[in-house]
Image (spheres, grey):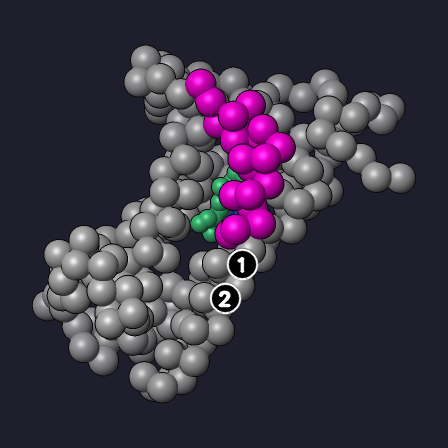
Amino acid sequence: MSLAVGDEIPGSRVIHPLIVRITHWLNAVAIVLMILSGWRIYDASPIFPFTFPPWMTLGGWLGGALAWHFAAMWLLVVNGLVYVGFGLASGHFRHDFLPLSLRAIWRDLRAALTFKLEHRLGTYNAVQRLLYVGVILFAIGVVISGLAIWKPVQFQFVTGLLGGYDTARIVHFAMMAGIVGFIVVHLALVFVVPSTLPPMITGRASTHKGTPL
Ligand code: HEM
């Protein structure tokens, strides 16, 4: 039997559609491969006065890291297009990430920091909405700036818009840093409210759950 969002089966309902779950986990794999291989590529020609320790990187050497980076890039982009296409076409983004106001973000942030935020499975609070919209924008930014430094001749319009090759590298790094920042907060929230994890795997949540954050 195929289940849709909101479908009730005794005691549980689907809160994450199959396509969101598949693209979420494929994206998590792709992002980790991109970041770790990206750090190895960065080490070959650092733009800041530091490098990443080799044990934190993927690929072994510049050539290996580039091979990983370009392989995972296809997974990230194709999978990302499926996720964003579904999110826009199905109304998932509109229904689950909007509305989003500064007032709601401030209210939920204060509640979260004082451990008073009620987490209702199947509904994202304003802080989560901000984080999800933010990371989607960072991911789009990392792909666009990546194109600018991968093919600066073919995409010279993009490279120019970003202020040239050297600035595009800094933008690419900044987008990566934003994504890493998101991952740290995202994993901390999953750790604090572990009941959110099983539904991201099975799709279903109990109809009677309300866990304080
Ligand atoms: C092992 C790593 C990860 C775990 C355990 C994890 C876990 C989760 C869980 C449990 C949710 C559902 C939250 C809820 O229902 O309240 C979620 C949603 C989400 N996660 Fe992750 N996540 C991981 C990695 C990532 C990465 C790397 C990204 C992107 C850079 C990401 C982006 C998202 C987004 C955008 C959503 C909202 C999905 C939607 O409803 O469209 N996650 N994640």
- Alpha-carbon neighbours of circle 1 within 10 Å: few (<14), some, or many (≥20)? few
Q: Residue at x 46, y 45 (%)?
A: 187
The secondary element bearing badge 2 is classed as helix
Q: Amino acid type of disc 1?
A: Val
Left-right relation of 165 to 23: left
Q: Which residues are magenta?
A: 80-99
Assess whether residue 90 is covered by the magenta stretch: yes
The secondary element bearing badge 1 is classed as helix
- Alpha-carbon neighbours of circle 2 within 10 Å: few (<14), some, or many (≥20)? few
Assess whether residue 84 is covered by the magenta stretch: yes
User: Which residue is more in the foreground, 47 or 92?
Assistant: 92
Q: Is disc 1 in contact with disc 2, using a CB cutoff of under 8 Å?
A: yes
Left-right relation of 8 to 48: right
Residue 178 seen by the camera: yes
Q: Residue at x 54, y 35 (%)?
A: 88
Q: Which residue is mark 2?
A: 74
Q: Quadrant of residue 196?
A: top right
Left-right relation of 150 to 77: left
Q: Quadrant of residue 7?
A: top right
Q: Residue at x 66, y 45 (%)?
A: 19
Confirm if mark 1 falls within 8 A of ligand 1: no
Q: Main secondary structure of the magenta part?
A: helix
Q: Residue at x 40, y 20 (%)?
A: 100
Quadrant of the drawing holding the N terminus: top right
Left-right relation of 137 to 196: left
Which label was assigned to residue 78?
1
Against 49, is 117 above or below?
above
Q: Position of residue 156 (x, y in %)?
A: 22, 64
Which label was assigned to residue 171?
none
Q: Position of residue 211 (x, y in %)?
A: 59, 23
Q: Position of residue 28 (x, y in %)?
A: 51, 55
Q: Amino acid type of disc 2?
A: Trp
